[in-house]
Amino acid sequence: MPRTGHASKSKVAHYPQTKYVYTYNFLVKLTLSVDDEIVRKARRCAEALGKSVNQRIREYLEQLAGEIDRKALAEEYRELTRNAQGNSRGWKFNREEIHQRR
């Protein structure tokens, strides 16, 4: 007996059953031309952070691509400040001097 006042049978999409899904991540090799002195300095900086230049470049590209990990950046900042070996040579911060218009 047909129903009155109701829409006809709705169409239901049928999807094949999927048992396994595989995800593949491919790394792209990138060749850069960089001055030797810059590479030496970069190695020293990366080493001070306990990282490789490759790691630092990868992190920079992720940041450039918009995949910023703010927690990792905050941790890197803490690590940099913890290992800072700056020397003010006796200079003291003076707010008036810094804001003085020249």
Image (cartoon, rainbow, N blue to C red):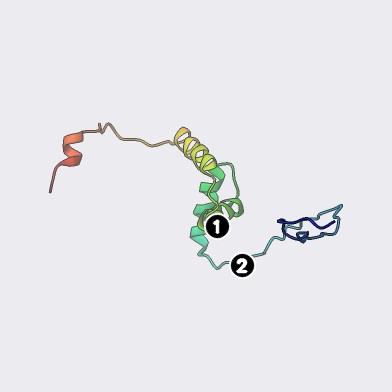
Q: Nearer the viewer, residue 13 or 46?
A: 13
Q: What separation in Å lies between label 2 and label 1 (alpha carbons)?
A: 14 Å
Pinpoint residue 102: horizontal percent, then vertical percent: 12, 49
Q: Is residue 83 left or right of residue 100?
A: right
Pinpoint residue 68: horizontal percent, then vertical percent: 53, 49
Question: Dividing the picture into quarters, in which one does residue 25 lie?
Answer: bottom right
The amino acid on which the numbered mark 2 sits, given as a three-letter code, is Thr
**10 Å neighbourhood of mark 1: few (<14), some, or many (≥20)?**
few
The amino acid on which the numbered mark 1 sits, given as a three-letter code, is Leu
Pointer 2 or 1: first along the chain = 2
Give the labeled residue for mark 2.
Answer: 31
Q: Is residue 54 above or below residue 30?
A: above
Query: Under tag 2, what secondary structure?
Result: loop
Q: Residue at x 14, y 42 (%)?
A: 100
Q: Residue at x 27, y 31 (%)?
A: 90
Q: Is residue 82 above or below residue 51?
A: above
Q: Quadrant of the N terminus?
A: bottom right
Q: Residue at x 72, y 61 (%)?
A: 26
The label on residue 61 is 1
